[in-house]
Amino acid sequence: MWFIVGMLLSAAPAGALGSVKGKVSLKEPNGTAAPSSGAVVYLVGFTEPPPETPARMVQKNQTFNPPVLPLTLGQTVDFANEDPMWHNVFSVSKARAFDLGMTRKPESKSVTFSKTGVIDVYCNIHPQMVGTLLVLPNRAFSVTDAKGEYAISNVPPGTYKAYVWSRRSDPKNKPVTIEVGAPATLDFDVVQDKMIEQHKDKHGRDYKAAPKY
Amino acid sequence: MRATRHSFVIARTAGAMIRRTCSAVLATLVLCMLLASEAHAGRRAFIWTWDTETVNKGDIEIEQWLWAKTLAGPTRKNHVGWLWFSPVYGLFDHVEIAMPWEVVVDTTTGLTRLTNFTFEGRFRLYDPQAEDQLVKFLIRAYYQQNFAHPDNNGFGNKPHAGIDLVMSVGDVAGTHGTINVGGMADMGFGSRHLFRQVATAAFTYKLSDEWRVGAEYLHELNFGDAPTAMSLVGSGASAVMKNNFRFFVGPNVGLSRGRIWATLGCMIGLTDVTPLLMPRLMFAVAI
């Protein structure tokens, strides 16, 4: 019983969580500034259960919305077709390969992701459709806005590694200490030096010319 | 009397052999299922066993088989070949349809004849997007119209319909092990085979991202010596066992690369009334 009392006394008060915010500056290899939206900052070092509500990646205007979607390990993503034409969402990533077959509005297919990793998502019909899922161990992540700014809240106090991911660079990381009542600030400067190769269709072939529908 | 005793001895011997073989095959299958790793290569891992995978909705594959068999009994040195061809279409998430037609090749003259045309649907009874599903089921239902020729097992021009229940243990793309139980019945009375029951069991093992190997077991029981179902009881059953129970085992190897997969294997007959060899090459291309 004393053990339980001790645990209760040592536990942080309910709602005692911290936060971190900052800015990600993306640059081209020649030093010029690049659009800084769409980078993902996330913390590793603890795990959390996924939210019950599925995330959504919508096929609209022949693009994936949002184009970058971080989610928590074990979470489900609904891939909804809101376009007037067929789409075929697939991924050949090692973290989770899948093929949803042909869908049309308003069909929606769901996939649950049970391994952490980066998952590139494409459409087998429209080569310009490219999306990315980041399956992360917790809910401490944020996507940068148009200014490159991010904010992560509801983080348990502790010292973690903060990573920044962007499509054209390898992940970078820095240590960050989260304290209750004192939001941490952490900025990243990232040079986008990765070349993105044109992806192939789900059978490994080059795409034919994108259909006009 | 002699015929009855002879039939009984053959039936009892065949039954014991069948039980021993089934036990060995089952033990091997279970062992290999425990040891087998995830096998993603190829879509159809086996040459005679239906698996539980289907093409996704909207996908089309063109599939072709080349196969042959030696004839059973005293004519075991003779053989017959077939060409099987079918488009396979993913109609819905859980449903795939195929419309195969088969041509028999007379190996003596080189002449070909249309032997049958089939319409079949395969219904997968599991969520194709769910991961880590250990056991999956599929039902295959088919209707086949036969065309009379000397090598169509006496079906003549009769249609027949059948259903297969398939269970696989392992992942979707490359099953560890699969068990397939099916039955086929002729549509008309008075035919040679009133009902056929088929069962197969198979496993596959991944060697690399592209290559896999495996083995299969197949038995086929044809109920048809007696003109009525009542004769399948008692002495009728021994007559059935004598002439109508066939079983095989055999290895297979598969390759998949891009949008093409191929599987090659050979079933080996284990009784005198079973064809000695049944090699089969299957391949398909996704379009």
Image: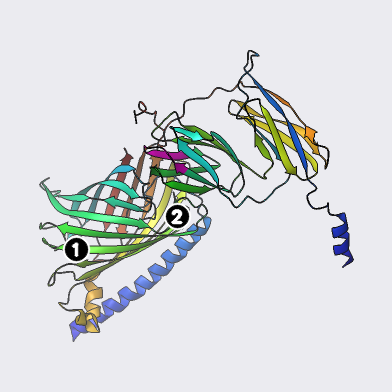
In the image, A102 versus B123, the foreground residue is: A102
Sequence order check: which comes first, mark 2 or mark 1? 2
In the image, A67 versus B83, the foreground residue is: A67
The secondary structure type at the circle numbered 1 is strand
Q: Residue at x 74, y 36 (%)?
A: A161
Numbered mark located on residue B178 in the image: none
Q: Quadrant of residue A119?
A: top right
Q: Residue at x 78, y 49 (%)?
A: A15
Left or right placement of residue B199 versus residue A77 in this view:
left
**In 3D space, how far apart are the residues under numbered discs 2 and 1 (Cα atoms)?**
31 Å
Quarter placement of the N terminus of chain B: bottom left
Q: Nearer the viewer, mark 2 or mark 1?
A: 2
Q: Residue at x 73, y 41 (%)?
A: A153
Label tally = 2
Quarter placement of the C terminus of chain B: top left
Left or right placement of residue B117 versus residue A71 in this view:
left
Left or right placement of residue B73 versus residue B209 in this view:
left
Q: Is residue B270 visible?
A: no
Left or right placement of residue B111 versus residue B229 in this view:
left
| Residue numbers of the magenta segment | A80-91
Numbered mark located on residue B127 in the image: 2
**Cβ atoms under marks 2 and 1 closer than 8 Å:** no
Q: Is residue B19 visible?
A: yes
The secondary structure type at the circle numbered 2 is loop
Is residue A83 part of the magenta span, yes or no? Answer: yes
Circle 2: residue type: Asp
Percent across and percent down for residue B259 are 37, 38
Percent across and percent down for residue A98 are 47, 44
Q: Which residue is mark 1?
A: B160
